[in-house]
Amino acid sequence: MASDGVDEARLSGVFAAMQPVLNERQWRRLLGAEARARGHGGVAAVARASGAAESTVAAGARELAGEEAGGREPLAAGRSRRAGGGRKKAEDRDAGLRPALLGLVDASTRGDPMSPLRWTTLSLRDLERELGARGHRCGKDAVARILAGEGYSLQAHSRVIEGRQHADRDAQFRHIAVMTGEYLAAGDPVISVDGKKKEKLGEFGRAGRVWRPRGDPVRVRDHDWEDLTVGSAVPYGIYDIAANTGFVVVGNSHETTAFSVSSIRRWWLAEGSLRYRNARRLLVTCDAGGSNGVRFWGWKDGLARLAEEAGLEITVCHYPPGTSKWNKIEHRLFCHITRTWRGRPLETLDEAVAGIAATVTGQGLKCTAVRDDAGYPLNRNPSRQRRNYLEDHLLARHDFHGEWNYAVLPSPRHGPPRRPKITPDPRVEAATLNRPALTGMSQADVLALAGALQAPLAADREQQNAALREKRHAVRGAPPQKRSGGPSSRISVLDHVLALRFREHLDLPTKVVGTLLGINSATVTTITRRTARILGEAGITPPPSAPPAAPARSQEALLAHAAAAGITLTIPEPLHTGPKFTKSKRKPDEKTGKL
């Protein structure tokens, strides 16, 4: 049946309405049925009305005719084409494509520096380009299909590896559990404390979503650069385990040891002293790092002052390094505060405080939040005398890992100091060490070199002391004061020269040199470098010396060398026992407490 323009327009409307709801097979059969109903010219008319190719319309007509005549098997359920129809997959056309792709993403080679692929190039398009360079042409969709078929999927990092574990990690956890159970059974307060991550104040985006009218999201800045005029919120939390309550102090200065102790003091005055009226002791569990770290004497000094004010014996138990997420405050309080803050910017400090105060849970958690506008300067550490006083009279360290577990007493402990007195390690007499076989120079030349070095070395020490006083003045705000008199260094000028000659002539290890001079190996490295530098800066030419001897890389080799030269050398055993309180130039990590 011939079709005019009106009939084709009607067909176009029908096809436009039906095509979106039909699959490929149903659409092809509809076109074929309409073409057969119109007879001669029906294929062309239906093609013009539907926009489909005449071959598609003709294929639909042949499919219907073949099924009616019984010459062709009907398609299986769920299929739009017969088996073998369509273009072959890339992995079927290229047998080497799949092995080449799996070789690129193999776990044993993707981190190899000799591999052409790097961690940063593991994307579908990069894999497509790399395969093309190796002669395997395929698209990124084929790459994704092959990887999915082999069990690969996009994976984010899973933070489950705790890193190197301390040998007494589990024992410390058991110790904390025993202490917590003892205090709770006696009705004494047990708190878990920690500093929460700083939050930038201002119109900054935050993770999470909240219900709002459609198309009206909260508009925030397109970058995360901190606005220094507004500052940051510095939360420090105290979680009362028995009462299931939180107390968070939000400052805008720095998270220092003074701020941490001040926050605990605020909790005790506002809630703790009222809730535990008869308490005479307090247990604090905290991380090994951060402002309440095990290495910070400012933390211990602040707790000592709080213990004296409140009349409490404050026992502190630190979690082992690398286990900060096991601290109860992390999953009892901080996670719920993060949920309360989600999806909205913290524009002011008051909004941050209000969000914390609104934190509640179905298990009965309630939280109090207060604002602290005080300034807490950095690098305010107690003096060495104060640290020694704390160690001798106010700290009672536990027998098990006293650096992690200790009690801060409310009043000084009387009697002799518990800390053993530091005794300098014994040494070999300088006259015995000043021998040509050991130094490569005559005794007179060594003494002459020491005499020439004395004035430049004293000037260098004074310059370093002056620089140190200026630095302390800049940090603490106190005027620099030059100490008059005082004991001189026990490392003499002759020791400087001997250490340098032992290293240059015999190539003695610094540990052996330190044993001979009664100092540690780090000090040997320092004085040898200083001596060589001062000699060069002062233009002092050392006297002629013998060529370097065969290296003596151990005490046994040194004794054999001395015996061959007729020198009776007795190397003493170190007598030092007890900790050496040396000041480290490196700062401990805030999370792990390690240097």
Image (spheres, grey):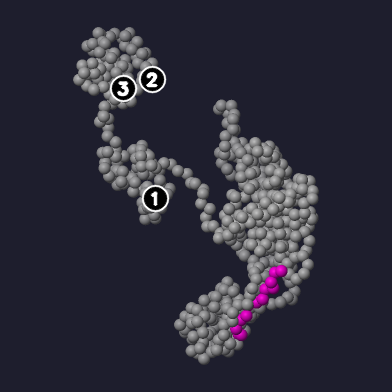
Q: Is residue 374 visible?
A: no
Q: Nearer the viewer, residue 228 or 244?
A: 244
Query: Is label 2 in a helix, a strand or a loop?
Result: helix
Q: What is the C-alpha distance between the residues marked 2 and 3?
A: 12 Å
Q: How many C-alpha atoms fall within 10 Å of the one at disc 2: few (<14), some, or many (≥20)? A: few
Let me know if residue 428 is in the magenta part. Answer: yes
Figure quadrant of the N terminus: top left
Q: Where is residue 356 shown, x and y percent of the image?
A: 67, 40
Q: Vertical placement of 3 versus 98: above or below?
A: above
Task: Tell whether 588 sits left or right of 2.
Answer: right
Q: Quadrant of residue 336?
A: top right
Question: Mark 2 sits on what residue?
Answer: 21
Q: Quadrant of residue 594?
A: bottom right
Q: Where is residue 137 shown, x and y percent of the image?
A: 29, 41
Q: Earlier in the sequence, mark 1 or mark 2?
A: 2
Q: Nearer the viewer, residue 541 or 303?
A: 303
Figure quadrant of the C terminus: bottom right
Label at residue 561: none
Q: Which residues, given as a range, are shown in magenta? A: 418-430
Looking at the picture, which amino acid does disc 1 mark?
Ala
Q: What is the C-alpha distance between the residues marked 3 and 1?
A: 43 Å
Which residue appears at 73% of the width and 53% of the height? 282
Q: Quadrant of residue 174?
A: bottom right
Question: Mark 3 sits on what residue?
Answer: 25
Q: Where is residue 281 shown, x and y percent of the image?
A: 75, 54
Looking at the picture, which amino acid does disc 3 mark?
Arg
Let me know if residue 499 is in the magenta part. Answer: no
Question: Mark 1 sits on what residue?
Answer: 107
Which residue appears at 74% of the width and 63% of the height? 394
Q: Are marks 1 and 2 in contact (CB under 8 Å)?
A: no
Q: What is the C-alpha distance between the residues marked 1 and 2?
A: 45 Å
Q: Are marks 2 and 3 in contact (CB under 8 Å)?
A: no
